[in-house]
Amino acid sequence: MARVCTQCSKGSQMGGKRRLLRAHYNPTKWERKQPNLQWSKVGDGPRRKVCTTCIRKNKAA
């Protein structure tokens, strides 16, 4: 099962950080960042994997 939010289709992203090391940048590895998915009951349906930003948006509305 893919790690994707069922409500907003948010998925993984590739990202990396460059650190300054004296006079030049040190190349670092790229990492895959995963969304923070939680089991949540949306409406009257069964519970689904939803990202925390969607959970916060639905509680505020």
Image (tube, helix red, strand yellow):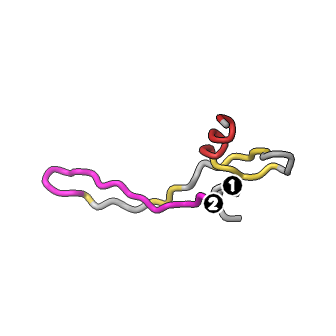
Measuring from the top left, give residue 52's x and y in whole percent. Answer: 62, 44
Q: Magenta span has 21?
A: yes
**Badge 2 element:** loop
* Highlighted magenta segment, given as a residue range: 9-25
Q: Magenta span has 54?
A: no
In the visual, does 7 lie left or right of 47?
Answer: left
Q: Give the quadrant of residue 11.
A: bottom right
Measuring from the top left, give residue 9's x and y in whole percent. Answer: 63, 60
Task: Point out the image quarter for the N terminus.
Answer: bottom right
Q: How far apart are marks 1 and 2 (CA)?
A: 6 Å
Where does label 1 land, which residue?
A: 7
Q: What residue type is labelled 1?
A: Gln
Q: Which numbered circle lies on residue 9?
A: 2
> Which residue is pictured at 65% across the width and 34% down the height?
60
- 36 above or below 29? above
- Give the camera-side residue of 48 and 61: 61
Measuring from the top left, give residue 6's x and y in whole percent. Answer: 70, 57
Q: What residue type is labelled 2?
A: Ser
